Image (spheres, helix red, strand yellow):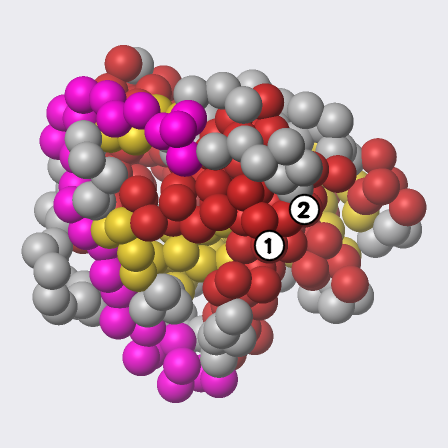
Amino acid sequence: MKLLVTGGLGFIGINFIMFALKKGHTIINVDKITYASNKEKKFLKNFKKYKFCKVDITNQIKLQKIIKSNLPDFIINFAAETHVDRSIKDPKSFIKTNIMGVYTILECCKKLLKLKKIKLIQISTDEVYGSLKYTGSFSEGDVYKPNSPYSASKAAADQLVRAYRKTFNIPSIIVHPSNNFGPFQNPEKLMPKTIINCIKKKEIPIYGKGLQIRDWLYVEDTAEAIHKVILKGKIGYNYNISTKNEMTNIKLVNKICNYFSNKTNVYKYNYKKLIKFVKDRPGHDFRYSLNNKKLRLIGWRYNRNFEKKLSQTIKWYLNRKI
């Protein structure tokens, strides 16, 4: 298949592209290149079925030209501002990229309907559902209750996708991944920040008491799930991507510190002393948890072994220049 990927130099986007290229798909990668974009794209040029276009998805004229000249089978939209802390400081940039960018993609698809009915996969987030206490999980039909400018912008984008499907017959599917980790993630996120700060023996800031609970999903498993949705997902459906591998932030950070203490520690350094509890951010969601039954019904199976995947991720950061 021919897949046009927006935001393909971002964390999940670049991992998905590598997965899809190995499956033999043709990839057109559209990315405007921001601070969060990966620069490690030289190896992608070795694939004959890969093409890169530096374009902002809010530029409708340029984006429509690219889509029209390639007429992909699917557009997979990873392009987004994603860091909650940044959304609190600067909501406007999130509204522009996450809402207006999706609007632009939808308008391009609408204008090209007579040439080809291009299917859209919108990459959303578990955060659109809001926060949970200690029990229960969100299902795809649950009401959106976003609590940050980031999650609100993603929720608005999802609603636009749904509206364009209903009103203009744009075929679309929305997926909701839980917290991803793995290679190529931006250092502002919790896991890479903790790993890098351990490497540099720098302070590791933890919001509140670190008791917030997240479901951790390895990025290659996310790529596989999205690929399964492309092959077998039903138009008009939402699919949650989750692992039920939930733990508190402080437990995760302690696991990473333990790795460094046990695997890399020649001088018996106490990495846990780097942890510093800081004032919690406004509106911080307590727990995310997703029911992934619909995804399992189309054949996706999560390959467990979190410890091994965490170890692989730490080794990836240890082996690159930081």
Q: As displayed, is residue 239 above or below residue 259?
A: below
**What SS does tag 1 mark?**
helix
Q: Position of residue 5 (x, y in %)?
A: 61, 46
**Which residue is located at x 67 percent, y 46 percent?**
315
How crowded pointer 1 is (Cα within 10 Å; few <14, some 14-19, many 20+) is rated as some
In the rendered structure, which segment of residues is drawn in magenta?
Answer: 272-299
**Which residue is located at x 57 percent, y 49 percent?**
262
Mark 1: which amino acid? Ser
**Which residue is located at x 57 percent, y 42 percent?**
260
Q: Position of residue 222 (x, y in %)?
A: 51, 60
**Which residue is located at x 17 percent, y 41 percent?**
285
Of the 4 image quadrants, the one containing the N terminus is: bottom right
Q: Who is closer to the viewer here, 200 or 24?
A: 200
Q: Is residue 175 left or right of residue 134?
A: right
Q: Who is closer to the viewer here, 11 or 249?
A: 249
How crowded pointer 2 is (Cα within 10 Å; few <14, some 14-19, many 20+) is rated as few
The residue singled out by tag 1 in the image is: 311
The residue singled out by tag 2 in the image is: 315
Of the 4 image quadrants, the one containing the C terminus is: top right
Q: Is residue 168 left or right of residue 104?
A: left
Q: Position of residue 130 (x, y in %)?
A: 15, 48
Mark 2: which amino acid? Lys
Residues under numbered marks 1 and 2 in contact, where contact means CB atoms less than 8 Å apart: yes
